[in-house]
Amino acid sequence: MNIINLISQFAPELILTIAALAIMIIGLGLEAKEKRVLGYIAALSLVAASLIVILRGAGYVQLEGIIADSLTIDPMSQFFKLTFLLVSLIVVIASIKEFDNHSNQDEYYTLILLGTIGMMVVASAIDIVTMFIGFELASLSTYALAGFNKKDAASMEAAVKYFIVGALSSTLLLFGLSYLYGMSGGLTNIAEIAEFFSTNPGVIQSPIGIMALMLIIAGFGFKMALVPFHMWAPDTYQGSPTVISALLAAGSKKMAFVAAFRVLLIAMIAIKVDLALVFALLAILTMTIGNVVAVSQRSIKRMLAYSSVAQAGYISLVFVVMSPEALTGGILYVMSHAFMKTGAFIAVAALGYVLLKENSNAKDVDHLDRFAGLGKRSPFLAFSVMVFLFALAGIPPTAGFVSKFYLFLAVLKGGFLGLVIIAILNSALSLYYYARVVKYMYVLPPESSEKMKLPIAYTIAILLALIGVLAIGIVPEPFVNWAADAANVIGL
Amino acid sequence: MNVLSLILFIPLIGAAITLFTKSREQARIVALVSSAIPLILTVMAYLEFNQGLAFLKFQFVEKIPGISSLGINYYLGVDGISMPLILLNAILCPLTVIYAWGESKQSNQFFALILILQAGVFGVFMSLDFFLFYIFWELTLLPLYFLISIWGGPNKDYAAIKFFIYTHVASLVMLLGIFALYFSTNVGTFEIPVLLQAFSDIASPEMRAAIFLALFFGFLVKMPTVPFHTWLPDAHVEAPTAGSVLLAGVLLKMGGYGLFRVLLPMIDGLGPYRSDIITLMAVLAVVSILYATFLALAQKDLKKMVAYSSVAHMGYVMLGAAALNFMSVSGAMFQQFSHGLITAVLFMSVGVIQHSAHTRIIGDLGGLAHKMPKLTFLMMGGFLASLGLPAMSGFVAEFMVLTGSYVNPDMQIFVILAMLGIVPTAGYHLWAMQRSMFGSFNEKLGDLHDLAFYEMMPMAILVLLIILFGVYPGPVINIFEAAGKIIPGVI
């Protein structure tokens, strides 16, 4: 395989890199009000990259040369790359209006693209060092994005919290990984590490080995926002600019899941340490606390943040069951959740934008009361919010239902009836707070009877997410098959 | 496209169009057309439906692969159990649209929701794949939730959310049962007939009983049966009339349908738990009949009384199913059909009273017959049918259930107990009629006007149908009998 060929395999990442650099350079010569064009460039590059990933499909590519040890192209990486690219695309399209006339748009779009590249690297990484670098690239970009509204105290608080917790969790993760590196005698490739430990089980089952695993679980736990490592998530999602909350919840949090699927699952298979109980506890705590706390939230962003915590609980059932079907369900869930959550956050952002446009002194634009009568003021926005929320609750015919169905089915097949019952009860509880928003939108009278004018950029972004949610819900077959192919990569 | 798919999707397409109509005029016409076309198609299908084959195989089958790795298909078909219920749904929806002709509040959304509800119910009765079945089962929740919470009465929030959560939890339990059935049988498909056939092969009898009970719970809440009926009176009292008509007329029938389609064929596979579970069903049935009847007797609100009468009537469905005699089972199926027609008349009458007298409290009414003779006439028809007057469809159904069940020696005691409810049933119907419609007119009610044409027409059609099927139940009951005979386990 020659070098040109090798490079072409990573065309999506390279396109984004070139676009990111181009945006930075072009931005230097533009007035703030002309900078909207940068958003178009970013969106175009994301569209191009997504198309390449889609056209290449869910195949394996045999890589050679120096890259072959650290990066891979397989159905799993492709699946997650597509998820990240689409999430970023939706976020960028919405941002074109959200940050119109903002003077720092060049940095903004560059950071989003760099963050996306980082997530894509994590999706393909089969080497712990490469993975960590991808992680840091994505994290550093999103730290800055979370604090992008630098005059807003809440946004600053969000960024600082996110940064401190993120840095701490990275260190924990790195510390844990370094033990693996040391104990295996200097291996960094995940498959090789796993093989080493399965032939020398004594090494990892020593106290130090267990501690290393615990550190890694804690590191990933923070990034996936599993209870008790979740405290940063609500503050960060609530304080960040809403479109960035979408990126954080649907993109960078999901990145942690890919990494955990690759590292933890492979490691746990090889090591044969039974962590089912630990993960079962984490999953139960995460979904229950996420849902219970979400019930009392009045800020919709905060409610979505807690719902995101709860959803992470469902996905982490994969680590308990460790079967190919469960992993398929988990992977499918990640993509579905990406669409539902991005859509929901973008819709909240759109509402906030319109309300601030109507009255620039408006406060708490994501408060539940602001949703009153939305069904009359903007039927499209209200309908989309309803679809996203019901999808999160798992009502058919949406992506949320299909992925929950598949995942819970797999958990039950694994013989964990109790877990399924708890998950289903949680799912029923979650319906209460989702339905409450719907009630506000359609039942209560609006604050003003004027029709809302939704900017076209938001409409497109919401429409994309809507298509994703309904496509997976109504025609699940291709998505399920791709997710099943992706799950085969891990070889459970 | 298969005729079933057309019946299923035309209301959905109609709903989408209705949503975008600009005026009430357009909305209601589109809604009427898109609910009338399924009626025409259903009648055509009903005539084409081969009664001789009603119990042998599914007809009008359509099968398109869905998620092949799990064995999920888009699989539709009808047999004798479902065909008449589809007819019931097809009849009730256009009549409801006509009845609600005057609805002026957000009428495009209102009619769209009715159409979605109709499609969901069609889907439940047609699906032969559990995945699809569950999707449509859940699809019926949302429209009714909105119908209650937007067009409902003063306490609508509470009623809507209670309805939603209560029935959703029950659905989830049912889903759990479906999962368990899928895994324990290990046939790798969600097709209902295949799964039911494989049910008795499950090794552990405890597992079989657990699956049965999980599914049973889902259907019990929907029917509803005492003690899981508490959401129903709240939902009915707050729902707009059209919502109540469809809720009692067709939505509750989904629970009964589940009983015949899914549970009865499983009963013989229950092994050591068979007799206990049958007794449980019979006890729940009798408790529903008696308890709900006495509750109805005590109600001050006319609509609440009608709601409780629904619970009692659905008790007969359960009793007939538990007796496992072909006459009682087909009687129970016919009871579903007949109750759908009767209760629609009752709720429509109550709706008219509420609309023109602005109260439903029986004590505040009185002598309405002087001002509203047409209503009184049609309402009397509905009430007499509901209390089981011969020559009306309710009598045929309940007679079949009671005599059929009495043939089963284990059921005799339950039949005798259930018959204790007959007199109070007649009592509350007549008493309510007498206090609200007859006697001297309560002048405080002011000037009342009688039925509008669009209210009278659907009620008159329903009363005619009730009498028609009471005198000549053949067209429907033959199909039910044929279907009832062949359900495994029914003698």
Image: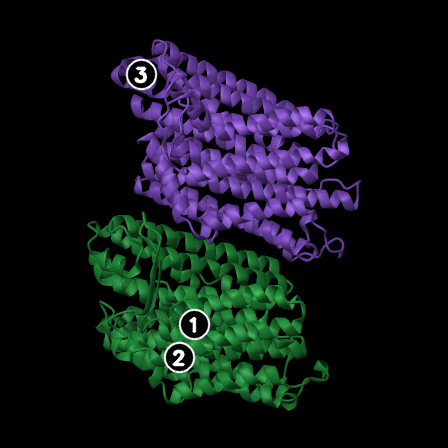
Residue at the disc numbered 3? A205
Distance between mark 1 and mark 2 Cα atoms: 33 Å
Neighbour tally class for label 2: few under 14, some 14-19, many 20 plus, Cα within 10 Å: few
A314 to the left or right of A108: left
B200 to the left or right of A353: left
Residue at the disc numbered 1? B312
Of the numbered discs in the image, which one, if any, rests on residue B381?
none
Task: Supply the letter of whichever chain is purple.
Answer: A
Name the element at disc 3.
loop
Neighbour tally class for label 1: few under 14, some 14-19, many 20 plus, Cα within 10 Å: many
Residue at the disc numbered 2? B44
Q: Chain of mark 2?
A: B
How far across and down, in percent of the image, does residue B451 sit? 62, 85
Q: Camera-side residue: A87 or B320? A: A87
Distance between mark 3 and mark 2 Cα atoms: 71 Å
Discs 1 and 3 lie in a common subunit: no
How far across and down, in percent of the image, does residue A125 sit? 43, 24
Neighbour tally class for label 3: few under 14, some 14-19, many 20 plus, Cα within 10 Å: some
**In the image, what residue type sits under mark 3?**
Gln
**In the image, what residue type sits under mark 1?**
Ala
How far across and down, in percent of the image, does residue A475 sit? 43, 51
* Viewer-side label of 3, 2: 2
At x 55%, y 56%, the residue is: B161
Q: Camera-side residue: A39 or B471? A: A39
Q: Chain of mark 3?
A: A
Quadrant location, the C terminus of chain B: bottom left
How far across and down, in percent of the image, does residue B22 sit? 67, 67
A194 to the left or right of B154: left
At x 40%, y 33%, the residue is: A76
Name the element at disc 1.
helix
